[in-house]
Amino acid sequence: MSTPERVTAAVLVIGDEILSGRTKDKNLGYIAEYLTRIGIDLCEARVVPDIEDEIVAALDALRARYTYVFTTGGIGPTHDDITADAVARAFGTGISINEEAVSMLLERIPRDELNEARLRMARIPHGASLIPNPVSKAPGFRIGNVFVMAGVPAIMQAMLDQVAPTLDTGVPIISEMIEVREKEGDVAAPLRRIQEAFLSVQIGSYPFFEDGVYGTRIVVRGRDAMEVRRAADAVNAMASSLAAAREAPHKAG
């Protein structure tokens, strides 16, 4: 079976604590790097509060547009952990205690401590399959093209490892970074010409200021290794040319 050229994904981060700034999100960057490495393009990310209507609306928009949607947060034992209910509503299905999920919880929690609050973590939308959680045992779940994972980074990462082997993946993106000691405004025009010559790659420029020196990091990304290499060579040649032009007046003096 041939590898699809492009598999896409979105991330939906759920939680009032993220939007208020009380909790700093550590999941989005990790997921982005992870998916890129295995050949899935992360195309969009959204952050929504713990409001069911907002979660449902975001899910409906993202799952229709991308191959996969990964959610983080809102599947714990407290009253504001409403992600599972929102997902069930988005898919038009019921939700109830899942006995397989209960068994997973009992691997870590004594039965006499499995109170009503902890049982909330075993409420799973009907038709969903469970995502094992080797860290704390409370599972995530998959329904359709949506993967519902914990917000705690260590648990989310463990769940993503469980999920990854089941995913369709495309041709991985290759990238090369070239750092030049030129201001972004000075590289913009020649960089545009390089981009126009290499339409199968994406070229991004990112200015920086370090140790009193302005510069630009130029990233060349694409799926064709040879084209990425050729475009990177063109960027290096451009940087050498600009540096030589900058040094010429000093030599002439």
Image (spheres, rainbow, N blue to C red):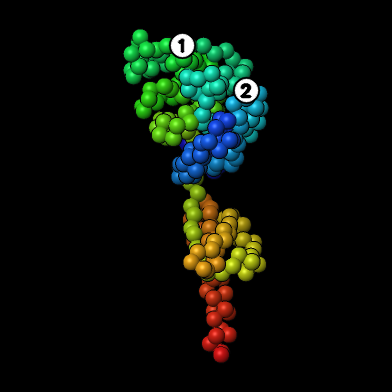
Tell us which disc is closer to us: 1 or 2: 1
Q: Residue at the spot x=45%, y=32% of the render?
A: 152
Q: Residue at x 52, y 74 (%)?
A: 240
Q: For the residue marked with disc 1, what is the amino acid?
A: Glu
Q: Work out whether 106 lies above or below 176.
A: above
Q: Which residue is tagged 1? A: 116
Quadrant hosting residue 51: top right
> Which of the two residues, 253 or 191, is positioned nearer the viewer here?
253
Judged from the image, the secondary structure of the residue bearing numbered disc 1 is: helix
Residue that badge 2 annotates? 52
Q: Position of residue 163 (x, y in %)?
A: 44, 31
Provide residue 72's location: percent of width, then percent of height: 51, 31
Is 198 located above or below residue 249 in the figure?
above
In the drawing, does residue 12 fall left or right of residue 99? Answer: right
Task: Identify the residue at the far bottom of this view.
Answer: 253
| Residue at image location 66% in from the left, 23% down from the top | 53
Characterize the local packing of mark 1: few (<14), some (14-19) or many (20 or more) Cα atoms within 10 angstroms: few
Looking at the image, is mark 1 or mark 2 earlier in the sequence?
2
Image location of residue 132, percent across then percent down: 40, 24
Classify the position of the C terminus by image quarter. bottom right
| Amino acid beneath label 2 | Glu
Which quadrant holds residue 42? top right
- What residue appears at the point 43 percent right and 22 percent down from the top-left corner? 139
Q: In this view, does 103 lie above or below 191?
A: above
Q: Residue furthest top?
A: 112
In the rendered image, residue 225, in percent from the top left (x then y), is placed at 48, 56
Dot 2 alpha-carbon crowd within 10 angstroms: few under 14, some 14 to 19, many 20 or more: some
Q: What element carries label 2?
A: helix
Marks 1 and 2, how far apart at CA: 21 Å
